[in-house]
């Protein structure tokens, strides 16, 4: 799954998870996840921000470096963070190219709208594969009034379908569709040939994506459209508490954790 063509030709549901570091990326690839997304969700998941807006190009580039070094088979897609694209075309292209040329990504993801159709076409022409993103676009959280479900009217749903078609025509190789009614997920998937990767978009899309912290149960809370398939948060807390207690009690380090050279000091 190291090429865009592999995503398009996938017969089974496409599996996508985020990763922001080498250790997580190695684990995600080892179980056979198809696509690793270095999402700007790292702002919420690892950097302590309450939104993705403060995430910088340097943040994404450094995380992409780590993920790319730890993987061989998964397709690595890097998010373009807020205001790194769309303001100036030349700067948008330079930022996208940096993630491929310097950080090792194989594609970029752009939170999309009418304003990104032309940019998608230009990036594709230059050899930079683009994953589009419609529905809930967290970088627009202030403009849309929060992390609310999108496409809830026939007019807005039709607009999402139209934008999906426009981005496919512009050359996007796949589409993330976030937090929309399942009817919209099905309609978009039927309207385009590129793979549609859902997150809170129902069961009829071509694949699914989750934030890895949500999927493994590391997040303090999980969105209503996600599921925790483990409880890593509780396991980490238990291990950290056990370490603290062992140090306080003197049980750690034990004899096997030390060595002696027989020095006469």
Image (cartoon, rainbow, N blue to C red):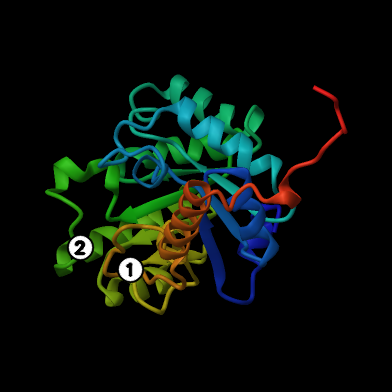
Where is residue 124 shown, x and y percent of the image? 56, 40
Q: Is residue 82 above or below residue 146?
A: above
**Residue 161 left/right relative to 1:** left
Tell whether label 1 touches label 2 (CB within 8 Å). yes
**Residue 100 left/right relative to 159:** right
Q: Quadrant of residue 205?
A: bottom left
**Residue 31 left/right relative to 108:** right
Q: Is residue 217 above or below residue 133?
A: below
Question: In the rendered view of the protein, which quadrant contains the C terminus?
Answer: top right
Question: Which residue sits at x=55%, y=31%?
Answer: 62
Residue underneath mark 2: 149
Which residue is at the front of the view, 236 or 180?
236
Where is residue 54 shown, x and y percent of the image? 31, 31
Q: Residues within 10 Å of mark 1 (few under 14, many from 20)?
A: many
Q: Residues within 10 Å of mark 2 (few under 14, many from 20)?
A: some
In the picture as drawn, the residue positioned furthest to the front comes out as 264
Where is residue 192 shown, x and y percent of the image? 45, 66
Which residue is at the front of the view, 88 or 198?
198
Q: Is residue 27 visible?
A: yes
Which residue is at the front of the view, 26 or 60?
26
Question: In the rendered view of the protein, which quadrant contains the N terminus?
Answer: bottom right
Name the mark on residue 111: none
Q: Quadrant of residue 181?
A: bottom left
| Mark 2 residue element | loop
In the picture as drawn, the residue positioned furthest to the right comes out as 262
Question: Which residue sits at x=15%, y=50%?
Answer: 146
Q: Is residue 127 visible?
A: no
**CA–CA distance in space, label 2 to label 1:** 9 Å
Q: Earlier in the sequence, mark 2 or mark 1?
A: 2
Question: Which residue sits at x=29%, y=61%?
Answer: 221
Residue underneath mark 1: 200
């Amino acid at each position: 799954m190291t090429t865009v063509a592999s995503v398009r030709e996938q017969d089974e549901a496409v599996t996508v998870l985020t990763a922001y570091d080498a250790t997580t990326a190695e684990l995600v690839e080892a179980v056979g996840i198809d696509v690793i997304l270095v999402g700007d969700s790292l702002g919420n998941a690892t950097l302590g921000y309450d939104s993705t807006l403060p995430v910088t190009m340097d943040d994404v580039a450094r995380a992409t470096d780590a993920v790319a070094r730890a993987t061989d088979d998964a397709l690595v897609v890097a998010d373009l963070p807020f205001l790194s694209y769309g303001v100036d075309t030349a700067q948008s292209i330079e930022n996208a190219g940096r993630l491929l040329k310097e950080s090792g990504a194989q594609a970029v993801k752009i939170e999309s709208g009418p304003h990104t159709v032309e940019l998608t076409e230009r990036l594709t022409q230059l050899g930079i594969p683009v994953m589009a993103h419609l529905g809930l676009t967290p970088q627009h959280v202030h403009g849309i009034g929060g992390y609310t479900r999108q496409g809830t009217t026939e007019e807005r749903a039709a607009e999402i379908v139209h934008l999906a078609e426009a981005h496919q025509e512009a050359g996007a190789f796949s589409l993330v569709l976030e937090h929309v009614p399942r009817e919209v997920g099905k309609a978009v998937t039927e309207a385009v040939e590129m793979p549609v990767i859902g997150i809170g978009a129902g069961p009829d899309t071509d694949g699914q994506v989750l934030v890895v912290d949500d999927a493994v149960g590391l997040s303090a809370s999980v969105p209503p459209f996600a599921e925790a398939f483990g409880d890593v948060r509780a396991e980490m807390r238990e291990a950290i508490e056990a370490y603290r207690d062992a140090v306080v009690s003197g049980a750690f380090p034990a004899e096997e954790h030390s060595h002696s050279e027989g020095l006469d000091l």
